[in-house]
Amino acid sequence: MASSSITASAVSRRHSWLPRWLTAESALPWLTPVIALLLAFGVYPLLYAVWLSLQERSRVTRQFEFVGLKQWGIALTDPRTWDSFQVTLTYTLVCLVVQVVLGMAIALLLDTERRGYGLLRSLMILPLVVPPAVTGLMFLLMEDAQFGVLSYYLKQLGIIDPDNPLLANNSTALIGVMLADIWQWTPFMVLIFLAGLRALPKEPYEAAAIDGASAIQAFRLITLPLLSRVIAVAVLLRSIDLFRVYDYIYVMTSGGPGTQTETLSFYAGRLFTLANFPYAATLALIVLISLNIIAAVFIKLFKVRF
Amino acid sequence: MRSNPALGILRDVCAWAIVLLFVFPIFWWILASFKPYTAIFNTTPVYWGFEPTLDNYRVTLGGVSRLSLITDEGAAGTVAGGGSSYYSIPSIIDSVIVALGSTVLAVVLSTLCAYGLSRFRFRGQQNFVFWILSQRMMPPIAIAIPIFFMFRDLGLRDSHVGLILAHTLINLPIAVLLMKSFLDDVPVDLDQQAMIDGATRWQTFWLVVMPLVKGGLAATAVLCFIFSWTEFLLSLQLTTQIRTIPVKISTFVTSTGTEWGFITALGSAALVPSFIFIVLVQKHLVRGLTLGSLKD
């Protein structure tokens, strides 16, 4: 590039005493503050977790003892780990699909210049500003079997059985929690998709209209391909947060009834509060490794470039 | 699109119905904060016909003690509450300090980093960004414990600075990705032109590029603010004296009962600052979240 030679010569004039990688003409100085912060506060917790996962608290001395991969062996053969892994996957996939599909549908609906839609778009973002812990309480109150407004209407509509409260029932408790997540994060998807839709060029649609394409064909053949990268990034960011879900479950069900709604990260959290730190750290690392694999595969598959 | 008026009306009806469905829980929540206890707990939903009360706000925001409320008016409290304080103005101040502090820090650091990523290509850049993103993949509970020990040794435990650093840490991945996308939208030619005209790199960054990404800065700032304002777990683990709003609200769930009136009141009050932020930068926010992905 011609530019780099120009800038390089400009720099050599100004800072000839500094090696180039230390000047503002290379990436390193710009990245340094972030790298420093992540190394100080991000890497230490990781190393600490890895160290913990190789320990065991001795029954006799109450001190940590090195036990190698023992915790990992226990974790991988613990049926409760696999159950919570399954709950996590179900939770992530269902919420993700609903949020993407619903988010896209609402974004398409609101993407118009008709009167009043600016207000609608602002109102649609509102759920995002509620703290998740408060959202959990909100839905806990609304899904209360006796006094909940949501339970009341669902009963009226015959969708839920009056004798089986949503959150206390094995088969529906997870759905009850997912409702809170879907309510809170569908607007996030709407926001991202709306931004994407508003930035689309007009010409392909005009051409398609001349060719007599239907609205559905235009969506499938023009909108989806053009939005594919926006969708990919949104799905990536959302999957990471969904897979680590904690707040809603902590507030709404504490993993119950039994362990029906216990996700991996909630199981890890429960072990932390029971002071079984080595095993909890192992589970946390399993979450981290799973997410790394999922994200790496996803980035490869959908060719996301940073 | 040439549209049929009937279809247009159908669209309006659907749009309003869906948006109102999403707004309903918030409406219900705010409504509950003005209700006396008996109206919150009614087997059929109560929309009107209750006597609106400000008691919940007087306790949480006005510092009126819960006990005097009962003796003065003989009403309201039917659930036994603990002796804990419900006065929450200090929590709101703590939350504002932490959210503003971590927002400023995250935006400054991520902007510098994003400029470096956007203007210089280096080997392993993709992996470097993935590493930053992966900082968000650890369950917060697993970060909280080691950071707790670390802060204890550094004397940062239970300090605003500590919590600001922790929130900055969890916000950085998203902030860096966002800021990079905005900076990618600013043509590199502008930088080169400025430097040929004699500007230093720093002047170029500060005087040429920054004014062009003001919208992006605002959008990133709002998201960081919201994430910090709503964060629960790290705040819960790292502080005891300082109580951010979500943590404060969680203390209203006591062993003797859940103080729904106070929870709804403080929850409603906590929406106001974030919402003001959103309204102020709504235009930029929508633009901002394409993450630059539409470029090619």
Image (spheres, rainbow, N blue to C red):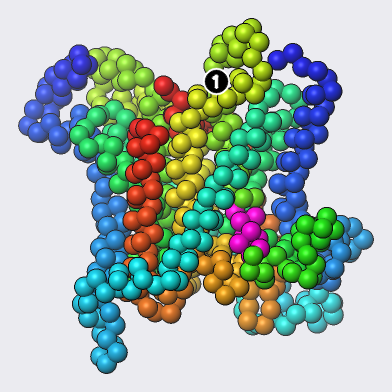
Q: Residue at x 59, y 31 (%)?
A: A194
Q: Mark 1 highlights which residue?
A: A222
Report the span colored magenta.
Answer: A172-181
Q: Residue at x 76, y 43 (%)?
A: B20
The answer to whether residue B211 is left or right of residue B269 is: left
Residue toward you, A300 or A269: A300
The answer to whether residue B223 is left or right of residue A150 is: left
The mark tally for this picture is: 1
Q: Quadrant of residue A9?
A: top left
Q: Is residue A13 above or below residue A298?
A: above
Is residue A156 something one can see in this rendering?
Answer: yes
Q: Residue at x 31, y 56 (%)?
A: A42
Residue closest to the far right: B49
How crowded is the residue under tag 1: few (<14 C-alpha within 10 Å), some, or many (20+)? some
The answer to whether residue B39 is left or right of residue B211 is: right
Rendered location of residue B147, percent (x, y): 34, 65
Q: Is residue A222 above or below residue B18?
A: above
SS majority, magenta: helix
Quadrant placement of the C terminus of chain A: top left
